[in-house]
Image: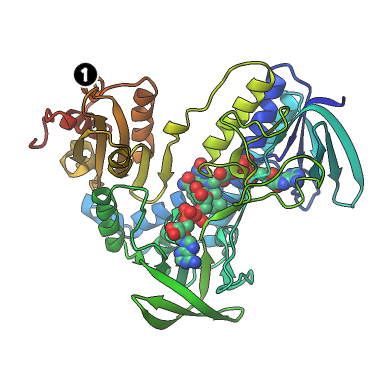
């Protein structure tokens, strides 16, 4: 055999699986087919190239611009009208992407992972055929194979992409001028994050969402606060509406939208389609390889990411569960460890989610709706950031922390946060939840003062009506 482990896909699921396999003493290679102009392998997948990292770079840059424009007056600071150099903002983002993707190549060399350039296809339990950019084929054999081919955006027939006026998330991370009027189809994670970026930079943004409720995965009391805040930020979100058709030219799009049963015509400079992603399995499975896709196109795996062929694993966006980089990475590590004979498991009950708007939205575990459906009795504690000294000092006091705990055992079962720093605060709650902490455990832990994390402390105390800084 050529390798102990052969990974197809160099995104967070694949590159982490490859590094871990090599660290565990297995002879490892990773096949990745995207190529840059200089024809070098482009590692890092969606996350580093066109996802998590470039979007956060633009979120941070646009937030600074917006703060300078209108967020500092209450602190007694005025700097005049800020000037936007969008080319420089994009260059900065591209440099960060280059640094991190180059970092993965460096980690491969350091960990002795062989990088193979080309498109991989699973032929059978031990063979992968790779076609390079010139069409040349070569087969490799491996004792174990990990599939990590990721996902691609979903297209909708009523508004087909044309790469200029109708774009997906990747195009929306590359714009070289601020659209005057921007429509976004889908008020999910990408819609809210990229809507925030372009709205802060000056676009008039209108979002069209098919669901009647914003963020249906959250409890309504939390979602209502979010909806109100986004209205204040001029993110104009239309719920329960459908885009029926579109007329596009290079620089303009006319949308026909059904809003509350009425057809309306609206014109925009650009439209971003952000209605979800699909597993990317095109040509990944050879016709006699022995694996099949489920009805939604995902590769079927057990709880350890093992496919129907015992030595073939699949991880990340091509398998069930949330399409998140940290979930892909954990699954990559689990696959490598299982191949090496270790017993690692992923705790699928505690996969955190974050939407990096301002304020951030972060949650983990069960919602009230989940607990009611499961017949679990619970207590809840809420704490608004408006009662947090640190949030007020920062001038960033929108939102709240909500903690749900089992009524009988007091174990914390869910946390939802909308507020400045929510992603980092959630992580503290998550560590407690991993160790089955009760709301009392959180209450007995000392939190530095003044921090925004104290809101988590107080919300946990509020579960048993013990909060100090709000009425119980
Ligand atoms: P991918 O990252 O998609 O990587 C798969 C790789 O496999 C790709 O490089 C592809 O070229 C390669 N490949 C595919 N088929 C083959 C083949 N046959 N042969 C060889 N190579 C192949 N998640 C978060 O957790 N946090 C965020 O903040 C976040 N922000 C995002 C923002 C945007 C705009 C988008 C689009 C996504 C974001 N995500 C975020 C989701 C995250 O990017 C994905 O969940 C994650 O990248 C999935 O990792 P993966 O390894 O499964 O797949
Ligand atoms: P999403 O599933 O988060 O949101 C898609 C939204 O589009 C949903 O609200 C859905 O109801 C709506 N929708 C679907 N079809 C529609 C239609 N025809 N008209 C109007 N609305 C429609 O998907 P996304 O925002 O495209 O993101 C894709 C994936 O990328 C997600 O799974 C997400 O996990 C991942 N991602 C994560 C982050 C993060 O972790 N911060 C950021 C960006 C993307």
Residue placed farthest to the front in the image? 375
* Secondary structure type for disc 1: helix
Colour scheme in use: rainbow
Q: Is residue 120 above or below residue 270?
A: above
Using the image, determine if residue 447 lies above or below residue 362: above
Q: Nearer the viewer, residue 367 or 434?
A: 367
Q: Position of residue 181 (x, y in %)?
A: 45, 74
Please indicate, yes or no, whether residue 329 appears anywhere in the rendered image.
yes
Quadrant of the image containing the N terminus? top right
Residue at 70% x, 41% y is: 43
Q: Quadrant of the C terminus?
A: top left
Q: Is residue 190 left or right of residue 221?
A: right
Residue at 18% over, 44% down: 386
Q: Position of residue 440 (x, y in %)?
A: 21, 21
Residue at image x 70%, y 44%?
Answer: 292
Q: Which residue is mark 1?
A: 444
Side (left or right) of 13 relative to 216: right
| 319 with respect to 383 (left or right) | right
State whether residue 190 appears in this view.
Answer: no
Q: Is residue 28 left or right of residue 384?
A: right
Residue occupying the point 23% across, 46% down: 397
Ligand 1 falls in quadrant: top right
Q: Nearer the viewer, residue 94 or 123?
A: 123
Q: Nearer the viewer, residue 331 or 18?
A: 331
Q: Position of residue 325 (x, y in %)?
A: 55, 40
Residue 258 versus residue 196: which sits nearer the camera? 258
Q: Classify residue 407 by image quadrant.
A: top left
Q: Residue furthest left?
A: 471
Q: Residues within 10 Å of mark 1 (few under 14, many from 20)?
A: few
- Give the image location of residue 95, x and y in percent: 61, 47
């Amino acid at each position: 055999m050529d390798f102990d482990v052969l990974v197809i896909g160099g995104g967070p699921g694949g590159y982490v699986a490859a590094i871990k396999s090599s660290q565990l003493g297995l002879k490892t290679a990773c096949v990745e087919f995207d190529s840059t102009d200089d024809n070098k392998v482009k590692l890092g997948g969606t996350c580093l190239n066109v996802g998590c990292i470039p979007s956060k770079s633009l979120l941070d840059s646009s937030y600074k611009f917006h703060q300078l424009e209108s967020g500092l007056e209450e602190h007694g600071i005025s700097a005049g009208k800020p000037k936007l150099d969008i080319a420089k903002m994009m260059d900065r983002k591209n440099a960060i992407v280059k640094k991190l993707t180059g970092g993965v190549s460096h980690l491969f060399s350091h960990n002795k992972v062989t990088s193979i350039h080309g498109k991989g296809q699973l032929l059978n339990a031990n063979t992968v055929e790779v076609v390079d950019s010139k069409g040349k084929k070569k087969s490799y054999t491996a004792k174990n194979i990990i599939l990590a081919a990721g996902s691609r955006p979903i297209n909708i027939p009523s508004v087909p992409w044309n790469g200029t006026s109708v774009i997906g998330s990747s195009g929306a991370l590359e714009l070289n001028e601020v659209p005057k009027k921007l429509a976004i189809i889908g008020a999910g994670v990408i819609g809210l994050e990229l809507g925030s970026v372009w709205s802060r930079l000056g676009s008039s943004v209108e979002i069209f969402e098919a669901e009647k409720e914003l963020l249906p995965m959250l409890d309504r009391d939390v979602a209502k606060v979010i909806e109100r805040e986004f209205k204040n930020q001029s993110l104009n979100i239309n719920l329960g509406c459908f885009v029926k058709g579109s007329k596009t030219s290079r620089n303009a799009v006319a949308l026909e939208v059904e809003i509350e049963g009425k057809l309306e015509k609206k014109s925009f400079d650009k439209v971003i389609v952000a209605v979800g992603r699909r597993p990317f399995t095109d040509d990944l499975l050879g016709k006699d390889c022995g694996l099949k896709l489920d009805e939604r196109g995902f590769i079927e795996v057990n709880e350890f990411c093992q496919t129907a062929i015992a030595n073939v694993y699949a991880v990340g966006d091509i398998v069930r569960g949330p399409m998140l980089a940290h979930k892909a990475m954990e699954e990559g590590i689990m696959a490598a460890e299982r191949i090496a004979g270790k017993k690692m498991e992923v705790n699928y009950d505690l996969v955190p989610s974050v939407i990096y708007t301002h304020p951030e939205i972060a949650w983990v575990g069960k919602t009230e709706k989940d607990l009611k459906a499961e017949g679990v009795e619970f207590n809840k504690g809420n704490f608004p950031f408006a009662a947090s000294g640190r949030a007020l000092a920062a001038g960033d006091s929108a939102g709240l922390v909500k903690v749900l705990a089992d009524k009988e055992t007091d174990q914390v079962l869910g946390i939802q946060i909308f507020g400045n720093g929510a992603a980092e605060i959630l992580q503290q709650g998550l560590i407690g939840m991993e160790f089955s902490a009760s709301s009392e455990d959180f209450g007995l832990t000392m939190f530095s003062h003044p921090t925004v994390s104290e809101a988590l402390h107080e919300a946990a105390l509020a579960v048993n009506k013990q909060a100090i800084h709000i009425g119980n």
